[in-house]
Amino acid sequence: EEEEEEEEEEKEELPLSHELVLEGHTKAVTAIALDDAGARLLTGGHDYMVKIFDFGGMKSDAKPFRSFEVDEGHPIVSLSWSPSGDAFLAVTGSPQPKVYNREGKEQGQFVRGDMYIRDQKNTKGHVAGCTGGQWHPVDKLTAMTCSSDGTVRVWDMDQLVQKTVIKPQLAKPGRVQVTAACYGSTGHVVAAGLMDGTIQLWDVRGKFGRSAAIEQVAVPSQQMVARQDWNYVSSAHKIIRSAHVAGSEITCLALSRDGHQLISRGGDDTLKAWDTRSLKQPLAVFEDLDTTFANTQACFSPDERLILTGTSARKADAGGSVIMFDRRELKMVRRLGMPGSVIALQWHPRINQILVGSGDRKAGQARILYSPLLSQRGAMLAVGRKPRPANPFDMLVASALPIYNPNALPMYREPMPGQRKRKTAESDAAENKQKHKPDLGSAAPGMGAGGKLGSTGGTLLTQYVLKTHGLLKNPLDEDVRASILRHADKADEYSLFTAAYKSTQPDKIYAEEEKDEEDEEEQT
């Protein structure tokens, strides 16, 4: 009974009683981020879209105020706010992450490295798709990204150029993808997970590493090639070999606030907890956690008593879940079923609400779990606001309505709607006559057009002389049949051309002469 009471008390302390669903993505939501103030939420998914929600202005219909595509054809990998909350970093499957301001306007794009340079420490940026990224938790001018090119790069967010290239130590020569990376709570430590199952940590306080220009042949000044002014780091501070199964992604890493505990989520369906002071063996291993997405996340609760992670749905009709583990006792304490695979997770400390990104190939949702008793602001602000009801006059907003002035001058006055202009039949006929343009036909002087012959109206001197002497006749008065028959006597002259018709048509057949109705009546 005491254990049941303790479980009920734990349930009451968790903000799980209410839920707000944010829809709009057509595929799984793989990245989610809420700024430090808990006012603006970012969601990104495999549909290449990023949506921005403002809890201060959002209604209960949960519509984003801005939606845009970061990089065409590249899914969203991670989203991260700056410490001040005035900008955010959007990392996609492209080698070039982008920076946006708070309103979603693009501010810049990272440089892409030269893919034909073999040694990655000599490139200005990533040469392969990115797999993760995070803004420095304290320093507004620093951010970090990791990539499939096998490097972790630290960037100057003011100039958008790299400051340091971190190249992990490998057991054997080659290139191994970096699948996940994270900062510590103070930004003093960077942890990275590799495709070979290795986890490495670097101390990045102060100026670390050596110049990448060392041991490089100086380029002649005539070539105008910029000097490599970034640093290069290879040796890791701490290394965990075989932390996860080689060949499977390490999907997420997270460090506790004191930096003494590290959790790692792997594509081998496990979640492991590590003590950074002794990395020989993990503190705990949680197995049978289905993972089908390469960036399935894990996080700590605000008081760091719980560890959260998500599981994927193996079948189309099945669902994933959010699983909570006790950090001290290292055992599972709660499982929350969710439709679709659970990928992105964040428990915001200020508003005490849990953000969940889930979905599949057909749809994606972001869910906000909260409790009216334990949570504050955030989704609770939007739930209480009803959206404005639809109004039939809303359709008239786009087009400006006409303004009628009854005292305007007659030439500028427009008739009021519903009133008919009083006009007499004479005025209507006069108006129609002015509007109607008669067909001039052949009487129109000039060249012929529109299938009608033109005429000069007899104004030419030559036409006048021929007409007075009877040599100019009207073609309409001429008998066409008679003019043809007058050449019948000359048929023998053209026998050379008509010899083929002597046997087939010996008799000439002509059309009968058409008679007018008046002639027929006279004959009768």
Image (cartoon, rainbow, N blue to C red):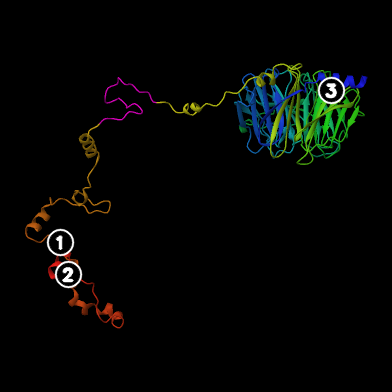
Examine the rendering and report whether any part of residue 181 can be seen: yes
Q: Which mark is residue 306?
A: 3
User: Is residue 130 magenta-colored?
Assistant: no
Kindly identify the amino acid type of the residue bearing the numbered disc 2.
Answer: Ala
473 lies left or right of 199:
left
Q: Which is more N-terminal, label 3 or label 1?
A: 3
Kindly identify the amino acid type of the residue bearing the numbered disc 1.
Answer: Asp
Q: Main secondary structure of the magenta part?
A: loop
Quarter of the image where the N terminus is located: top right
Examine the rendering and report whether any part of residue 229 can be seen: no
Q: Is residue 482 above or below residue 299?
A: below
State the CA–CA distance, disc 2 to disc 1. 12 Å
Estimate the x, y position of residue 213 in percent, counting from the top left: 72, 29
Residue 384 in which image quadrant: top right
The residue carrying pointer 3 sits among few (fewer than 14), some (14 to 19) or many (20 or more) residues within 10 Å by Cα, namely: many
Estimate the x, y position of residue 206 in percent, counting from the top left: 77, 18
Q: Residue at x 30, y 83 (%)?
A: 503
The residue carrying pointer 2 sits among few (fewer than 14), some (14 to 19) or many (20 or more) residues within 10 Å by Cα, namely: few
The magenta-colored residue range is 402-422
231 lies left or right of 109:
right
Q: Which residue is mark 1?
A: 477
Quarter of the image where the C terminus is located: bottom left
Closer-to-camera residue (100/267) = 267
